[in-house]
Image (cartoon, rainbow, N blue to C red):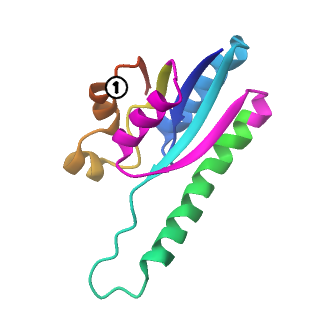
Amino acid sequence: MHKFLVPIDDSDNADRALQYALGLAKERSSIELHIVTVHSEPDVYGDIHVTETQMAELQLKRSHATLAPALEAAKNAGVEHTSEILIGNTATMIVKRAEELGCDGIIMGTQGRGTVGRLFMGSVAVKVVHLTKLPVTLVK
């Protein structure tokens, strides 16, 4: 059985990547998808009235909300899948988890949540391509 890691966020490109992966898995019954979303460690700065624990809970709640539609789509498609919320640097965690799981590749969108993040941090997809030895399929 082949396994592909599919990272998602709230972007249209991530949704298209998921749809591509689901189509591939439906065509070939020997494909399992591992659907993940990644959020950073909680950061609380300055005079903010949210504790680190509260921030972590908010991030976890948001991550579950991000995963829910993807898991529903996989279930409705009848595709074998697992899921997980990862915490840390997005590109690093995607690559690390795909390699830990023995994935055959990564299927992901080319652009995530917004252009501002890409300007300051660079594209997560580009970082994943450079960090991994696995094949990466980028979906626009």
Q: Position of residue 76 (x, y in %)?
A: 79, 34
**Residue 65 placed where, x, y %?**
62, 57
State the quadrant of the C terminus: top left
Q: Position of residue 116 (x, y in %)?
A: 27, 52
Task: In the rendered view, tell whether residue 2 sits above or below residue 52.
Answer: above
Residue that badge 1 annotates: 132
77 lies left or right of 83: right
Determine if the magenta segment contains residue 103. Answer: yes
Q: Is residue 50 above or below residue 121?
A: below
Quarter of the rendering containing residue 74: top right
The answer to if 91 sits in the magenta stretch is yes
Q: Is 68 above or below relative to 46?
A: above
Dot 1 falls on a residue whose secondary structure is loop
The quarter of the displayed image where residue 80 is located = top right
Which quadrant: the N terminus?
A: top right
Pick whichever, 24 or 84, lies toward us: 84
In-front residue for pair 51/20: 51
Q: How many numbered discs?
A: 1
Tell me where residue 105 appears, x and y as whole percent.
Answer: 48, 20
* 80 sits left or right of 114 in the view: right
Q: Residues within 10 Å of mark 1 (few under 14, many from 20)?
A: some
Read off the magenta span. 75-104
Question: Which residue appears at 33% of the width and 39% of the height?
Answer: 124
Q: Is residue 77 left or right of residue 111?
A: right
Question: What residue lies at 59% left-to-right and 37% top-to-bottom?
Answer: 35
Which residue is at 34% across, 25% downward? 132
Q: Amino acid at mark 1?
A: Thr
